[in-house]
Image (spheres, rainbow, N blue to C red):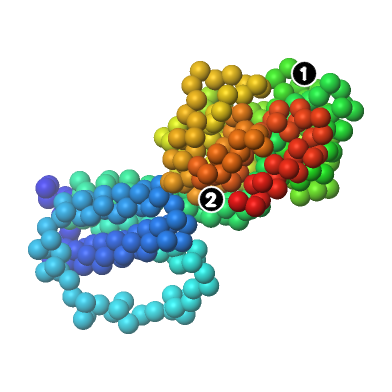
Amino acid sequence: MSHDSQPANPHSTITAWRAIDAAANRAAEGLRVVEDFVRFGLDDRHLTTQVKNLRHDLTATLKLFSSETLHRARDTQADVGVTVSTEAEQARTDLAQIAISNLKRAQQSLRTLEEFSKLVQPAVSSHFEQLRYRSYTLEKAITTTRENGARLADARLYVLIDGGRDAEHFAQLAGELIAGGVDILQLRDKRLDDKTLLERARHLRKMTSESSTFFIVNDRVDIAALAGADGVHVGQEELSVKEARAILGVDKLVGVSTHSIEQARRAVLDGADYIGVGPTFPSQTKSFDQFPGLDLVRQVADEIRLPAFAIGGISAENVGQVIDAGLTRVAVSGAVAAAKDPKSAAAKLRAILQTD
């Protein structure tokens, strides 16, 4: 270690080590509380694993310091901070506040570790910086999972429709689906010109604004923004969640199609508001080379608590298999939109999902 990297005097060294020791304990304790929240409060295996990995990586980084030095510098009895507390520290209104407060505590402690380690062991500082950035990603994922679990708590049936034969046919179908209890309507049409697509989107926005149905536009963030949609749905090869949100704003929904458990995990950390999971069964409206099927549904149901909609060839006849696999939210198209009586078909499927 060069002379320039050393603290100016022994008192500075002791101060740095005391701060590091205290911050290390606070960070580890805070992360443990957060881990318990996502484990027992959210029942989210994926986020539990992410927090646990962060906590273990913190432990590994702290081992780069001499434990003997840390223990020698510790002086709890002389620490004035031990007896200092505020009313806010003693007040917690719900489980989420406990989790976020402790995550903030861990983040602040990681910054303390990052700064004070520059005085005594500079090479370690960047490790704490990276851990801090990871904690920000986790905070977003935990908050998004919790908030959208509430925002979309009653959303069970998601229906994809195109622009129809003409504006009248489109409006009639959309009206029947809304009346049938569809929770989310997605406008997906690759054949219409932009002007007509925007007209359809604005019409659907007007219709859904008078109901509890969410309105999503597939892929086209520009159309979603111009029409004032509730959000956009993107695939693996479209805009990222970050890019879509930069255009739509933070309050809009951004959904992501996922075809593997790895993609589903990534979507959670990227900040998606919900995910589509599939394809589950062969579909008449979209072709796929591979079908992850019910195995993926089971994996997502086991690991992830972000709202997840199984998609692909689902109908009233096979939706029971999806429910048995662990998901009670589905996205459909032809099974409802192409039915002789779309309203009744939607109501029937919605009732099945609601009772399970």
Residue contact between numbered discs 2 and 1, judged by CB atoms under 8 Å: no
Callout 2: 10 Å neighbours few (<14), some, many (20+)?
many
Give 55 or 18, whichever is nearer the viewer: 55
The circle on residue 144 is 2
* Residue 258 visible in the current orientation: no
Kind of residue sitting beneath label 1: Asp
In percent of width and height, residue 234 lies at 59, 31
User: Would you name the residue on which mark 1 appears?
Assistant: 193
Compared across the picture, whether 25 is left or right of 254 comes to left
In percent of width and height, residue 36 lies at 38, 61
Instruction: Report the Cα–Cα distance between label 2 and label 1.
Output: 34 Å
Query: Does residue 159 sit above or below 113 in this rendering?
Result: above
Residue under the image location 66 percent in, 51 percent down: 354
| Mark 2 or 1, nearer chain start | 2
Residue under the image location 12 percent in, 58 percent down: 66
In percent of width and height, residue 331 lies at 64, 36
Residue under the image location 13 percent in, 61 percent down: 67
Q: Secondary structure at mark 2?
A: helix
Compared across the picture, whether 87 is left or right of 132 comes to right
Residue under the image location 35 percent in, 49 percent down: 49
* Quarter occupied by residue 274: top right
Kind of residue sitting beneath label 2: Thr
